[in-house]
């Protein structure tokens, strides 16, 4: 089923429901105004959009400025450094969309002390592997004191721990967590989280020192206080590393084996009474590492078994609430030009009626009766637009036309709402759409 929402109707809705700004083009090949993202961030003013073409870029930081940093459609944008969003006032917001963030020596994404909304869409976010002897892998994302942040359609991973090369003198590096959230309000939709694996102990041939221990895996997600909502996402804790081998069959001057590292959790709640609300997710712990090969003269130093596996959910502190029902989703582009037809797909249950909230700003409030979090304001601060009913296929394909507004860019905050035949309501994926003038 395809429905076209007329440009005149949509133009009326957008005229009161968007940030307007200039467009700054970043192209490592030199065709844009900037060859790196950070100078464009510094030159931009509130409401601007930074359009990034294919290429490799250094990391960048946004501090208390309303900006959209988006990869162009089809662009392969690789950021080889950390991306930071810090100190947003409550009136400001940031969108990061379509970037592959893969630093070589740090966590990939960090945000701290943000009162405004942060939206991260369609990004690959990978913490660096441990590089030194026995070094820990680094986190994919680190959040602290964030009032409103949502990840949609992202893949986050922690770096792998580095092996210990000092035989019995160290423990191999721990895997990095894919996401650490401290005292923050976080929503996750249709994402994948993989904790890093622990480093292996040194292999056989380590002189007369004992085999080193394998490092523990990193958790897919760690919540230390605050709130987490997760829908239709997958969590995989990292595996523990294998223990180093003992030097075999030497009773005089031989060496003992090293133990394996513990597997990590899919989701771990610690700290000051965190709350996690879950709907339609897959959560699995990592496997514990096995011990190294045993020197018969020393015996097995590790009790004859592998290290413990991680749990899908481990909540030594806080509360986990599992919502009943099936997760829904909205898919659409994050970047579009004026005078083009924009496809939107609603994925739900046949018979669901669907709407979109359309607003000029993001928001964050738990709405348990609606099985989710309101990530835009509700009317009258947002418009609620009906798009029809999900057909038997489970997907409603809808289109709308973006007209010419006579300005360079608009940033639109949306969220899908589904109502089933039993009158149950489900808030689903958010979307932040950057509309560009056709000149870009």
Image (spheres, helix red, strand yellow):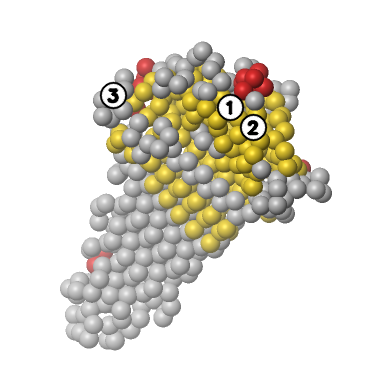
Q: Is residue 330 visible?
A: no
| Above or below for 219 versus 28 | below
Kindly state the secondary structure of the residue where label 2 is placed: strand
Q: Residue furthest right?
A: 422
| Above or below for 127 versus 411 | below
Residue at 73% from the left image edge and 22% from the top image edge = 380
Kindly state the secondary structure of the residue where label 1 is placed: strand
The answer to the question of whether label 3 and label 1 lie on touching residues, with beta carbons closer than 8 A, is: no
The answer to the question of whether label 2 and label 1 lie on touching residues, with beta carbons closer than 8 A, is: yes
In the image, residue 247 lies at what x, y percent? 23, 78
Kindly state the secondary structure of the residue where label 3 is placed: loop
Name the residue carrying label 2.
4
Name the residue carrying label 1.
401
Q: CA distance from mark 2 to mark 3?
A: 35 Å
Relative to 121, is 81 on the left or the right?
Answer: left
Residue at 62% from the left image edge and 23% from the top image edge = 7
Name the residue carrying label 3.
31
Q: Quadrant of residue 399?
A: top right
């Amino acid at each position: 089923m395809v429905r076209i929402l007329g440009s005149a109707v949509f133009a009326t809705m957008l005229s009161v429901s968007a940030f307007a700004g200039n467009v700054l083009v970043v192209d490592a090949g030199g065709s844009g105004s900037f060859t790196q993202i950070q100078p464009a961030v510094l030159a931009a003013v509130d409401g601007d959009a930074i359009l990034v073409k294919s290429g490799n870029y250094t990391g960048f930081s946004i501090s208390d400025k309303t900006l959209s940093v988006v990869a162009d459609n089809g662009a392969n944008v690789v950021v080889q450094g950390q991306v930071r969003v810090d100190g947003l006032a409550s009136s400001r917001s940031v969108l990061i969309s379509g970037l592959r963030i893969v630093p070589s020596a740090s966590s990939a994404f960090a945000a701290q002390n943000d009162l405004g909304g942060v939206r991260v869409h369609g990004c690959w976010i990978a913490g660096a592997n441990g590089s030194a002897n026995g070094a820990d892998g680094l986190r994919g994302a680190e959040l602290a004191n964030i009032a409103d942040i949502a990840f949609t359609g992202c893949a986050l991973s922690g770096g792998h721990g580095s092996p210990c090369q000092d035989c019995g003198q160290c423990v191999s590096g721990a895997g990095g967590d894919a996401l650490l959230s401290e005292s923050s309000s976080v929503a996750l939709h249709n994402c994948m989280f993989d904790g890093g694996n622990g480093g292996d102990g040194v292999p056989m041939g380590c002189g007369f020192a004992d085999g080193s221990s394998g490092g523990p895996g990193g958790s897919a997600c760690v919540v230390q206080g605050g709130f987490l909502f997760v829908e239709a996402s997958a969590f995989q804790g990292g595996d523990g590393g294998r223990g180093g081998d003992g030097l075999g069959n030497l009773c005089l001057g031989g060496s003992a084996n090293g133990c394996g590292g513990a597997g990590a959790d899919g989701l771990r709640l610690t700290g000051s009474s965190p709350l996690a609300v879950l709907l339609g997710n897959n959560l699995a712990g990592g496997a514990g590492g096995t011990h190294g090969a045993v020197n018969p003269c020393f015996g097995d130093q590790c009790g004859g078994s592998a290290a413990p596996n991680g749990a899908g959910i481990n909540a030594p502190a806080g509360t986990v609430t599992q919502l009943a029902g099936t997760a829904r989703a909205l898919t659409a582009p994050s970047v579009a030009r004026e005078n083009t037809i924009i496809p939107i797909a609603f994925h739900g249950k046949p018979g669901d009626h669907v709407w979109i909230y359309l607003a000029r700003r993001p928001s964050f409030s738990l709405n348990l009766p609606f099985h989710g979090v309101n990530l835009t304001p509700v009317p009258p601060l947002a418009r609620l637009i009906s798009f029809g009913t999900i057909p038997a296929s489970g997907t409603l394909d809808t289109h709308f036309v973006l007209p010419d507004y006579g300005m360079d860019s608009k940033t639109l905050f949306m969220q899908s709402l589904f109502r089933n035949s039993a009158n149950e309501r489900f808030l689903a994926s958010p979307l932040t759409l950057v509309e560009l003038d056709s000149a870009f």
